[in-house]
Image (spheres, rainbow, N blue to C red):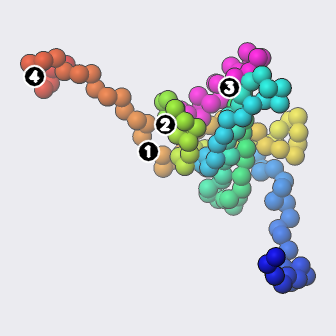
């Protein structure tokens, strides 16, 4: 057993309100963690993303978002895939092969209070961050053999 001396009365008091939802507004964020998990019923999968505010008064605050990418409810799946596509466009990422492809890229999230649960936030929109690098360019078409450099 390791000995450790600690007096709780001497510890700083945690700031109150850290569990309150973020005020509605636009926040620059990055994805810091991701995972693919099974639904409770075990008949589908969702992507869970941990996001962090990286600028302003709420810098450091975290938010979690889930995308039901494989669900028996086709409408829920379509909504999740649409939201994920919106996030990808905001990040300048066309295709992903691993959820880590979304990590550490800045984006702007339009956040509101969840109308079903006022103790939680909900992302209503995704947009490109001001300092985001340009979207990746597609490779040029191969040149025909013997073609001049300006001809394709």
Instruction: State the SS at label 2.
Output: loop
Residue position marked by numbered label 4 in the rendering = 148
Label 3 environment density (alpha carbons within 10 Å; few <14, some 14–19, many ≥20): many
The answer to whether mark 1 and mark 2 are in CB contact below 8 A is yes
Task: Name the main secondary structure of what is drawn in magenta.
Answer: helix
Residue position marked by numbered label 2 in the rendering = 92
The answer to whether mark 3 and mark 1 are in CB contact below 8 A is no
User: Residue drawn at (8%, 18%), measured in percent from left and top?
Assistant: 146
Looking at the image, tell me whether mark 2 or mark 3 is earlier in sequence order. 3
Q: Quadrant of the N terminus?
A: bottom right
Residue position marked by numbered label 3 in the rendering = 69
Residue 138 in the image, given as x and y percentages of width and height: 36, 28
Label 1 environment density (alpha carbons within 10 Å; few <14, some 14–19, many ≥20): few
Q: Which residues are magenta?
A: 70-91
User: Residue drawn at (64%, 25%), measured in percent from left and top?
Assistant: 81
Which quarter of the picture shows residue 56? bottom right
6 or 60: which is nearer to us?
Answer: 6
Residue position marked by numbered label 1 in the rendering = 133
């Amino acid at each position: 057993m390791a000995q450790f001396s600690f007096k709780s009365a001497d510890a700083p008091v945690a700031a109150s309100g850290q569990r309150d939802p973020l005020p509605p507004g636009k926040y620059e964020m990055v994805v810091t963690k991701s995972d693919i998990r099974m639904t409770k019923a075990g008949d589908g999968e969702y992507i869970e993303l941990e996001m962090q505010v990286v600028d302003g008064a709420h810098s450091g605050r975290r938010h979690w978002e889930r995308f039901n990418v494989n669900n028996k409810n086709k409408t829920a799946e379509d909504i999740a895939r649409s939201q994920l596509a919106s996030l990808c466009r905001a990040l300048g990422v066309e295709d992903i092969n691993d959820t880590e492809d979304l990590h550490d890229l800045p984006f702007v999230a339009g956040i509101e209070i969840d109308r079903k649960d006022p103790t939680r936030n909900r992302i209503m929109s995704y947009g490109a961050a001001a300092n985001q690098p340009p979207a990746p360019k597609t490779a040029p078409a191969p040149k025909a053999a013997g073609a001049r450099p300006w001809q394709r």
